[in-house]
Amino acid sequence: GIVSLSQLETRFLIIELEDGTQHFLFGPSEDRWYYLDEIPYYIEGNEAVAMLGKEGVLEKLLPVTLPKSVATDNTNFVKLLVKKEGEKLSYRRDDHLSGHFSTLVRSNDQSYWLHKFALEQDSLDYFSQESFYPYNLDVSTSDVSNFIVTKNETGTKSISLKNMIPQNIFSDSEEEENELYNYVILPFEKSIKYSVYYQSDVNVTLNEKNDVFLSNSVGEISYKSTQVNETIISISLTLIIKDRYLDGPEKLKAFEELLMKWSEVRQTKTTFNE
């Protein structure tokens, strides 16, 4: 396998409590800190060596396999309710982040990472953080400037989520280039879901659905618009990365397919009559 210098330099403690349970504790890095049992994503699943001893004397070495998370542990769920009354739009956005998404937002660059998720630190109405696995973090805001509704020349309207969702499946700020020939390790498995509801004070009707779907060995992408009732339409966008190790041409091709489909989804618009 591939081992980076940062992996070799990482140190941690194994703490044994009175009830006999053992826990991992990683010290802070330059830009972030970790809760008990929180594993940095770049060393998840790695083989490590524990040095056991007492009074400064090394007694034995013990191999340790670090735990690793799955897509359901690292989530970014966004619910946005848009209400139209006359010519005025009001918003309510609730975000739930867990696992490594929570770690990123808790970093020293909190405002930077919130901005990456199309949130602004100064506009948050609510911020709540749990200190136990998977470290759920919840934020809310009524100040949403990146939701786009445009009126078309035909008289229809279109909703675009382009400015709300990440530009890339993994932005270059989450992990530096880590490709080596035909072997790629993605930062972590993850699940992202955006649920958007547009509620009008008059009847709305979907004009065209433009649904998108792709599922392969690496992940899944779906975009679906739905007529909820006479005055509400919804858009659901899901991205799941279920494999980190792209250890061959077939996996690389599958990931490239996801990249192309994600680019397509970012350009997709939901058109409706109002």
Image (cartoon, grey):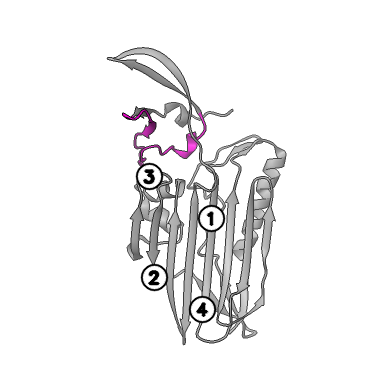
In the image, is residue 28 part of the stretch drawn in magenta?
Answer: yes
Image location of residue 68, percent across then percent down? 51, 37
Dot 4: element: strand
User: In 3D space, how far apart are the residues under numbered discs 2 and 4 (Cα atoms)?
Assistant: 15 Å
Q: Do the residues bearing badges 2 and 3 touch, measured as CB atoms within 8 Å?
A: no
Magenta span: 17-46
Marks 2, 4: nearer the viewer: 4
Residue hosting label 2: 142
Marks 3, 1: nearer the viewer: 3
Dot 3: element: loop
Q: Residue at x 53, y 55 (%)?
A: 192
Residue hosting label 1: 192
Q: Farthest right residue?
A: 250
Q: Residue at x 55, y 45 (%)?
A: 189
Residue hosting label 4: 199
Q: Earlier in the sequence, mark 2 or mark 1?
A: 2
Identity of the amino acid at label 2? Ser
Marks 2, 3: nearer the viewer: 3
Q: Quadrant of the C terminus?
A: bottom right
Image location of residue 18, percent across then percent down? 31, 29
Dot 1: element: strand
**Crowding at mark 4 (Cα within 10 Å: few <14, some 14-19, many 20+):** many
Q: Which quadrant of the figure has residue 234?
A: bottom right
